[in-house]
Image: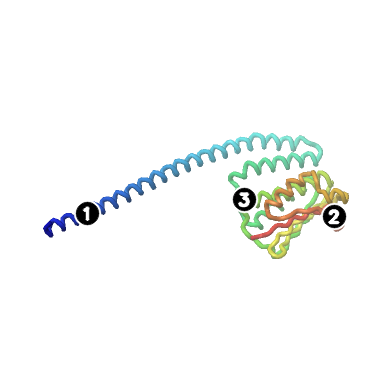
Amino acid sequence: MSWLALIITAALALVAALLWRRQRRLQDELVRLRGALATDVASERLKAAAEERRRLLADLHDDIGAKLLNLVHALERPEQADLVRSVVQDFRDVVSRTNQDACTLLQALGQIREETEARLEAAGSRLDWQQAPDTPDPDLDEAQVLHLFRIAREAVTNALRHGQATRIRMRVRAIARTLVFDVTDDGPGLAAAELTQASGRGTAGMRHRAEALHGSIDWAPGTTGGTKVILQFPLH
């Protein structure tokens, strides 16, 4: 075989190799584009489903929420009205959970304080809010915010409904990157057996939420009477 034939053969082999590599790249790109297209379609479907869910929840909120608020104004006993307000707030939690943004600890505490003050004022009670000035302000995710809100709300509900509280103290402080949040009422307090077992009255749900925060919750006698709920969970 002449040198010219060898050169032509080598050139053809090189061209064939380059074409094969080019074809492989094109095939890989086609697979990638098909995957991206499928992902985009799936993403659009998820967005559409989420939007429809938000629309349905908003409709439920506007309809059922309005009727519950009308019921609040029709009730004469403050504890009954507060119970309905608690149901309304729980319902709003369910609706807003889809769109709820994470926030910082201090923002969440500020919202808890504002909501509790409004509830106690409507029930003829008052709030004593005590927050350490050096309370840290880490970011909380949506689930943490929800658990903290629901524990605080249930503690207030129990104090009003079962403790006939006229004053509730909420105290916030941090000890070695652990948040200590306690709620104390001025009611008659719980019996020793009730404090030990702490069953019923929504306490099972409160324990579950405390565990979800990787923390703990306990019930104890208040310093000057009443019942104290103590929530502790780590801050990151």
> Which residue is rendered at x = 65% and y = 57% of the image?
105
Viewer-proximal residue, 143 or 162? 143
Viewer-nearest of discs 1 and 2: 1
Mark 2: which secondary structure? strand
In the picture provided, is 13 more to the left or to the right than 88? left
- Label pair 2/3, CB-CB below 8 angstroms: no
Q: What type is the residue that disc 2 sits on?
A: Pro
Quickly name the residue at label 3.
142
Q: CA distance from mark 3 to mark 1?
A: 61 Å
Q: Quarter of the image for the N terminus: give it.
A: bottom left
Residue 162, located in which quarter of the rendered image? Answer: top right
Q: Is residue 96 above or below residue 12?
A: above
- CA gap, disc 1 and disc 2: 89 Å
In the image, taking residue 193 as reference, residue 98 lies left or right, namely left
Mark 3: secondary structure: helix
In this view, 181 is above or below 78: below
Mark 1 vs mark 2: which is more N-terminal?
A: 1
The reply to whether residue 90 is in sight is yes
Q: Nearer the viewer, residue 142 or 66?
A: 142
Amino acid type assigned to the residue bearing label 3 in the image: Glu
The residue to which callout 2 is attached is: 221
Q: Which residue is mark 1?
A: 13
Q: Tag 1, which secondary structure?
A: helix
Q: On the rendered structure, is 90 left or right of 225?
A: left
Q: Residue at x 85, y 58 (%)?
A: 223
